[in-house]
Amino acid sequence: MTQIIVLPHVEVCPDGAVIEAEPGQSICEALLANGIEIEHSCEMSCACTTCHVIVREGFDSLPPAEEAEEDLLDKAWGLEPQSRLSCQAIVKDAPLVVEIPRYSINMAREGKH
């Protein structure tokens, strides 16, 4: 099992969390399996940016993003160099520290920021 530290997010995970993920599982799958209800509007099909996360530690242990993910990330709210779509970022053996951005593109459109 691989440890993922989830930094606090005011709505999704107010106290932060430490969870375990199976290598080969996506970050999104691991979050959802542990009760962290990250948005995933396209049902993890790499067609939106609502599951955008920033990998604060362990970024280089993830397989590189494919072109479709890179294209979508350009549209993500709060994009950073360590940004990934959590549905596409596959966990390996290295521990990760993940931040869920305060807003997704859906929240910004709905005026929740």
Image (cartoon, rainbow, N blue to C red):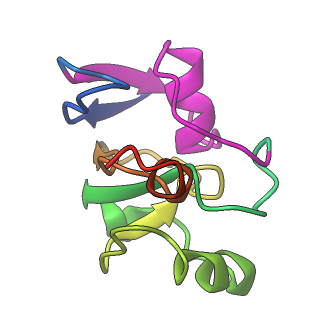
Q: Which of the 4 image quadrants contains residue 40?
A: top right
Q: How many marks?
A: 0
**First to last magenta residue range:** 16-42
Residue placed furthest toward the top: 35
Q: Which of the 4 image quadrants contains residue 41?
A: top right
Where 5 falls versus 32 (above or below)?
Answer: below
Q: Please state which of residues 28 and 62 is positioned toward the viewer in this rendering.
A: 28
Report whether 19 appears left or right of 31. left
Q: Position of residue 37 (x, y in %)?
A: 52, 23
Whether the magenta-drawn stretch holds residue 28 is answered as yes
**For the point 56% across and 51% down, which residue is it?**
106
Report whether 25 appears left or right of 36. right
Residue placed furthest toward the front: 111
Q: Please state which of residues 94 and 33 is positioned toward the viewer in this rendering.
A: 33
Q: Position of residue 10 (x, y in %)?
A: 23, 28
Report whether 86 appears left or right of 36. right
**For the point 31% across and 22% down, which residue is it?**
13
Whether the magenta-drawn stretch holds residue 66 is answered as no
Q: Position of residue 65 (x, y in %)?
A: 59, 76
Q: Which of the 4 image quadrants contains residue 15?
A: top left
**For the point 36% across and 74% down, which residue is it?**
79
**For the point 66% across and 75% down, which residue is it?**
69
